[in-house]
Image (tube, grey):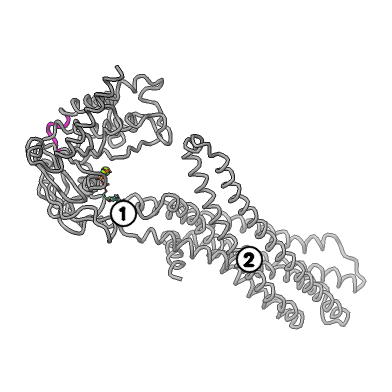
Amino acid sequence: MQTLSRIIKLTVSGNKTLLISTYIATFISGIALLLQPYLIGLVIDQVVESLNRGESVHVNQILQSTSLIFITGLIRGIAVYCQSYLSEKLAQKLAYTMRNKFYDHVQHMDFKFHDEFHTGNLMSRAITDVEAMRMFVIGAMIRGPYFILLFSVVSIILLYNDLLLGIIAMSFMPVIGIMSSYTRLKLSSIWKIVQEQLAHLSVILQENLTGMKVVKSFNAQQHEVKKFDLESFYISKSMIRATKIQTRNSSALEFLYILSTGLVVVIGAYKIIEGDLTAGQLAQFVFYLGVLAIPVRWIGMLVNNIARTVSAGTRLFDVLDKKSEVQELKSPIILKKPQGEITFKNVTFGYTETKQAIKNISFKIEPGETVAFLGSPGSGKSTIAQLIPRFYEIKEGQIQIDGLDIKSLSLKSLRNNIGIVRQSPTLFPVSISENIAYQDIDSNQSEIEKAAKIAQIHNYIKTLPNAYQTIVNEDGSNLSGGQKQRIMIARTILHNPAILLLDDSTSSVDATTEENIINAMKKVMENRTSIIITHRLNTIKNADRLIIFHEGEIAEEGTHNKLIKSNGLYKEIYNLQMIADEKNKDIIESLQ
Ligand SMILES: Nc1ncnc2c1ncn2[C@@H]1O[C@H](COP(=O)(O)OP(=O)(O)OP(=O)(O)O)[C@@H](O)[C@H]1O
Ligand SMILES: [Mg+2]
């Protein structure tokens, strides 16, 4: 109920006039609908009575009486048009608000949220569940009260017109109502299964299409086709089952309706003969019976509509009510152009409650200093890089920029001053130019090219037929891993942040290109604080200091010379790489 009342409040807020207008149009269309059987009955009686009296009936007379029927028909047509238009407008307004609220909310959530909710899941909430809300406005919210009113008024008219016939007719209604509600609920459980099957099918489809190249490389097409075929078959089966139940129900309803009408006509005819009822009154009765069937048939639909909306609304509000753990202060400090001092004070952090990714980490990086992070996979290097822009919230310890707790800073200003090249490059399916200028859309072409030159990617881009206007494929497949990394570096260079975080950003480029990037970056890194996370020792040649991580803790820190002398973990890593390099040299020499 709480979910429904929230949806209703959201629909009503700011749309009171629209809602009232929709109800007025619906009300007018209802009155016009109710007038028609009454007017038809009058015309019939007029004709029958005249004939009974042995008078002739003039066409003009009939035309006069029937013109009212046409007028009410016209009014009803216009009212129905207005009602459909206005209710759709109202429903679209809610859908628009919900979609945007949802999208906006997701944009501002922390990384923990995105770890928890999968993309496909969020997409289905933003599209399917919002659509369910739209249907709720048109269905239960507008038509619900209308049908209840229509049912009540027609019931009173039927019972008032003729008590016996009214009771006979009404006695069928609970049966029809229960039958259609039962069927709807049964159908709704099938729809739920179909929805799950469809979701599963779309996951198979998405995985297959994004991994099409892998599928082909492993010659797994046959297996994939079988998997899809099976799921697709289940959907058809469920759909056929649903249609069977639906048509069975509508045939039974039709039969019951005809049965009740038949009974009413037989008893009504007897009453006419007895002189207790006129032909016009019987006709009115049969027509009203037809009107009564409309809301009764809709009961099932409304029950289904409400059930679906409650589940969709719960799913949507689940996300909308999720608060990002990363919250700004009410009046945060705007970080203008920081010196770039980074301090970690006893920081402990885990992605889950049970496992800590980094433990009691403390270090200080001076403004303008270049520090390299080294350590085995999973030792917590990327985690630290993600904590500095506050993508995740820490519960223990403090992180400071220029001595200010990052929790006291505005997120926008904090992130604006940090350039991060993440470990897995993500480009958007737009032009290379737009990808480089993603954070700085106002940059001109020469600024973009300058950044690309430093990142050692300009020459390659120039060889492409559309150069900087080349559109990156959806999965970035028209660029190599190293090219993508360099475009990401160019993006960060163009943004010109005070703090630079390079997370394994040259892992996919060859040694010579890496050397060129490092040399070109020297100038870029000169006046800014930089953290270079790497597995390769030649990347850290320019680092002022090294911090070595092991299982979420700092194992050692100092300059290259100091660490070599101390014979610790760094020395071990260094020796291993030297041996590997020597081996490589031997292999290269043996090939020559
Ligand atoms: N989003 C996440 N959710 C849960 N656990 C995570 C997440 N990201 C990282 N971890 C875990 O946290 C620990 C530290 O990971 P992190 O990515 O910081 O390591 P790393 O030093 O950068 O490793 P690599 O050198 O392989 O990049 C690992 O145990 C990892 O499995
Ligand atoms: Mg990493």
For the residue pair 250 and 224, the one nearer the viewer reads as: 224
Residue 434 versus residue 411 in the image, above or below: above
Q: Quadrant of residue 144?
A: bottom right
| Residue under the image location 21 percent in, 32 percent down | 579
The C terminus lies in which quarter of the figure?
top left
Ligand 2 quarter of the rendering:
top left
| Residue under the image location 18 percent in, 38 percent down | 573
For the residue pair 127 and 487, the one nearer the viewer reads as: 487
The tag earlier along the polypeptide, 1 or 2, is: 2
Task: Report x, y in % for residue 516.
Answer: 22, 24
Task: Report x, y in % for residue 120.
Answer: 45, 50
Q: Quadrant of residue 365?
A: top left
What's the mark number on residue 202? Answer: none
Question: Around disc 1, counting alpha carbons within 10 Å, would you say few (fewer than 14), some (14 to 19), or many (20 or more)?
Answer: some
In the rendered image, the residue lying farthest to the top is 592
Magenta span: 523-529
Position of 154 compared to 264: left or right?
Answer: left
Label 1, secondary structure: give it. helix
Task: Name the amino acid type tagged 1.
Answer: Lys
Q: Which residue is mark 2?
A: 30
Label 2, secondary structure: give it. helix
Is residue 279 something one can see in this rendering?
yes
Q: Is residue 315 magenta?
A: no
Q: Quadrant of residue 256?
A: bottom right
Question: Around disc 2, counting alpha carbons within 10 Å, would you say few (fewer than 14), some (14 to 19), or many (20 or more)?
Answer: some
Q: Which residue is mark 1?
A: 112
Task: Report x, y in % for residue 483.
Answer: 33, 29
For the residue pair 183 and 209, the one nearer the viewer reads as: 209
Residue 507 versus residue 412 in the image, above or below: above
Task: Name the amino acid type tagged 2.
Answer: Gly
